[in-house]
Image (tube, grey):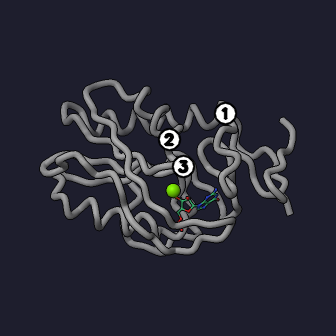
Amino acid sequence: MDTVTLHDKTFRPFISEDEIQSAIKQTALQIQKDYEGLCPVFMGVLTGSFLFTADLVREFKGDCEVSFMRVASYEGTETTGEVKEVLGIKENLEGRHVVIIEDIVDTGNTLEKLFEIVKKHNPASLKIATLLYKPKAYTKNIPIDYASMEVGNEFLVGYGLDYDGLGRNLKDIYILTE
Ligand code: 5GP
Ligand code: MG
């Protein structure tokens, strides 16, 4: 695999497609065990989690529903921590078992906001699944129930993650070079 250049920055290969897919399979199995017979609602967070959500639910055997919500909070390579709005919760989530599907949990600011908003819909249960988790950056108390992979504080792109709009279509995950 070669480096990729997006806008003004260069990224090198970090997590391969195979590693990503096998981590997702493990997470799907875990969720499947925990939600047997419960028909969970998977709420993907757009745009970053569109591929993760698609691959995760394809590995999940059993009844489930899939939906997406959108939130805006990140610009460039620095987290702003500012969640503007959450759009797209049209379903009745009351009494449902909801799993929020995130691409990456960094400081947890976005997640905290999402969690509060979804909670207001009175789900029977609410858990978090994230493809990537940055434990060293995380500042919140909300448990990260399912983290497919833990990473450091570096800036990553690919497999749904973008740098100013580019890189989401890469099959592997790349890391910013110095
Ligand atoms: P938090 O609110 O947890 O600090 O940041 C969460 C959001 O910031 C993620 O949903 C993602 O959009 C963005 N983010 C955090 N770390 C990275 C990263 O390494 N790469 C990219 N592309 N986005 C990130
Ligand atoms: Mg996101």
As rendered, which of 152 and 41 lies closer to the eye? 41
| Numbered circle sitting on residue 17 | 1
Residue at image position (50%, 46%) is 49
Element assignment for label 3: loop
Element assignment for label 2: helix
As measured in the structure, the alpha-carbon distance from the residue carrying label 3 to the one carrying label 1 is 16 Å
54 vs 112: above or below: above
Q: Amino acid at mark 3?
A: Gly
Q: Nearer the viewer, mark 1 or mark 2?
A: 2
27 vs 122: above or below: above
Check if mark 3's residue and mark 2's residue have beta carbons within 8 Å: yes
Residue at image position (59%, 44%) is 160
Q: Is mark 3 within 8 Å of ligand 2?
A: yes
Q: Amino acid at mark 1?
A: Glu
Q: Is mark 1 within 8 Å of ligand 1?
A: no
As rendered, which of 126 and 4 lies closer to the eye? 4
As rendered, which of 30 and 133 lies closer to the eye? 133
